[in-house]
Image (cartoon, rainbow, N blue to C red):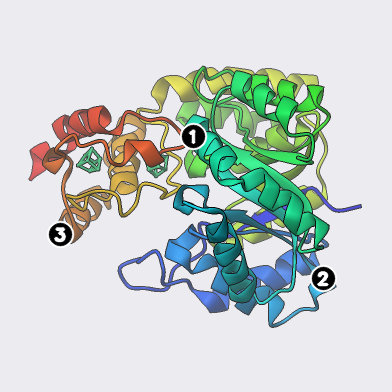
């Protein structure tokens, strides 16, 4: 049986001096891949757009060129927002096979379905395409990743019985969130008996670095474990979840997570109560629920590094200024726009799976951050 922990290739270590998204540290990624497989895990998750299109190449270099195809289980995703006709599915899919250096995908998903992306997928034949690649043996399992309310998820699953699994955002901070609806979406998936892949268990890293009160409660029970340990175990304990993905950024994270997930046990009642209290604290203190997924990158006419702005904003709200704060902020402004440059065009908002009102939150960030320039 496949182990329940997957290597998300969307936040790989970077080698570029300026941390450019596309400059993946391949040597470290290969070491991470080696440890991942050596630890008995197999599931590798990529997508067309991750790392500005370079993640699939990194998969090829780390896995396809170094291991037999049966040694790893590969998932890839169709960027449905780039599809304007059926042939686009075929063209992009062929490119993905080539970039990953494989002849088939084990899991293949329509990426990021929400109201608009679902409507477009229906319009251009996305579900027909899934059925076609499955029938041809080019994808063993077909499904979609999802970022919208539970009601729509139910509608989609009612109409598309061919879907075998869904990928949902599951973490303890979003469990009861009214926009994300983690718990309700899981209930819907279970009702339709679809397997669940959990994404963003650590909420883009936010749950690895928690407020002091949460840290104290966590370490009281497990003094030698970090906060990510709790976040991963929460997601993996949800009924119906057969895979938890983590977008790891260093060999150390891979070491910690493979060690913990090899010894996985579901949360106990006592641990559940601690996590529930933690969710209350975290959701109150997290200023902007950005997961740093980067989907909005490249949309901004003012070249604002949106995810970085929110990372710094959250850091300041959470912990106050750290030692590198001023330099990080200056560095960000030197490379692109600053929060007060936002013109409120909302081009970014259409791409945000977290449904963040980015233009509004930019104004808040400008008030809190731009003052120091
Ligand atoms: S709303 Fe602001 S941050 Fe978003 S794309 Fe427009 S200018 Fe950039
Ligand atoms: S603002 Fe939204 S789209 Fe942009 S990085 Fe954050 S979560 Fe992703």
Q: CA distance from mark 3 to mark 2?
A: 44 Å
Badge 2: how crowded within 10 Å, few (<14), some, or many (20+)? some
Task: Single out the mark in the foreground, 3 or 1.
Answer: 3
Does 68 sit above or below residue 211? below
Does 293 sit above or below residue 313? below
Residue 71 disc label? 2
The reply to whether dot 3 and dot 1 touch (C-beta < 8 Å) is no
Quadrant assignment, res 65 = bottom right
Residue 157 disc label? none
The reply to whether dot 3 and dot 2 touch (C-beta < 8 Å) is no
Residue, disc 3: 334
- Residue 74 position, x and y percent, is 72, 62
Residue, disc 1: 210
Badge 3: how crowded within 10 Å, few (<14), some, or many (20+)? few
Please name the residue shown 49% across and 20% down the image: 281
**Residue 259 can be seen in this image:** no
Q: CA distance from mark 1 to mark 2?
A: 36 Å
Disc 3 residue: CB within 8 Å of ligand 1? no
Task: Single out the mark in the foreground, 1 or 2.
Answer: 2
Please name the residue shown 65% across and 70% down the image: 97
Quadrant assignment, res 34 = bottom right
Q: Residue furthest bottom?
A: 65
The secondary element bearing badge 1 is classed as loop
**Residue 272 can be seen in this image:** yes
Does 284 sit above or below residue 120? above
**Mark sitting earlier along the chain (1/2):** 2
Please name the residue shown 18% across and 41% down the image: 339
Q: Answer with left or right where residue 206 lies relative to residue 71.
A: left
- Residue 113 position, x and y percent, is 56, 38
């Amino acid at each position: 049986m496949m182990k329940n922990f997957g290597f998300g290739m969307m936040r790989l270590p970077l080698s570029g001096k300026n941390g450019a998204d596309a400059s993946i540290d391949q040597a470290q990624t290969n070491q991470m891949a080696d440890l991942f497989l050596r630890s008995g895990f197999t599931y590798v998750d990529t997508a067309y757009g991750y790392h500005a299109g370079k993640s699939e190449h990194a998969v090829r270099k780390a896995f396809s060129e170094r291991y037999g195809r049966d040694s790893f289980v590969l998932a890839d995703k169709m960027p449905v927002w780039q599809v304007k006709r059926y042939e686009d599915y075929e063209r992009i899919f062929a490119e993905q096979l080539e970039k990953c250096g494989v002849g088939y995908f084990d899991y293949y998903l329509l990426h990021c379905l929400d109201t608009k992306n679902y409507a477009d997928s229906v319009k251009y034949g996305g579900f027909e395409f899934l059925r076609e690649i499955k029938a041809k043996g080019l994808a063993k399992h077909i499904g979609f990743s999802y970022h919208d309310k539970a009601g729509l998820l139910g509608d989609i699953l009612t109409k598309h019985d061919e879907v075998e699994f869904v990928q949902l955002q599951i973490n303890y901070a979003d469990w009861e969130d009214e926009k994300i609806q983690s718990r309700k979406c899981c209930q819907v998936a279970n009702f339709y008996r679809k397997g669940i892949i959990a994404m963003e268990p650590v909420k883009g890293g936010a749950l690895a670095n928690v407020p002091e009160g949460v840290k104290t409660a966590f370490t009281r029970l497990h003094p030698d474990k970090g906060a990510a340990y709790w976040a991963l175990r929460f997601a993996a304990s949800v009924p119906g979840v057969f895979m938890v993905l983590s977008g790891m950024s260093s060999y150390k994270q891979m070491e910690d997570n493979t060690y913990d997930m090899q010894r996985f046990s579901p949360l106990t009642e006592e641990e559940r109560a601690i996590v529930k209290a933690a969710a209350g604290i975290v959701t109150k203190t997290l200023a902007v629920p950005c997961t740093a997924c980067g989907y909005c990158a490249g949309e901004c006419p003012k070249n604002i590094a949106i995810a970085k702005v929110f990372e710094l904003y959250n850091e300041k709200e959470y912990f106050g200024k750290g030692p590198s704060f001023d330099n990080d902020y200056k560095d960000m402004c030197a490379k692109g726009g600053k929060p007060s440059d936002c013109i409120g065009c909302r081009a970014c908002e259409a791409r945000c799976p977290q449904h963040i009102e980015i233009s509004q939150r930019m104004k808040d960030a400008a008030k809190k951050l731009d003052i120091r320039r």
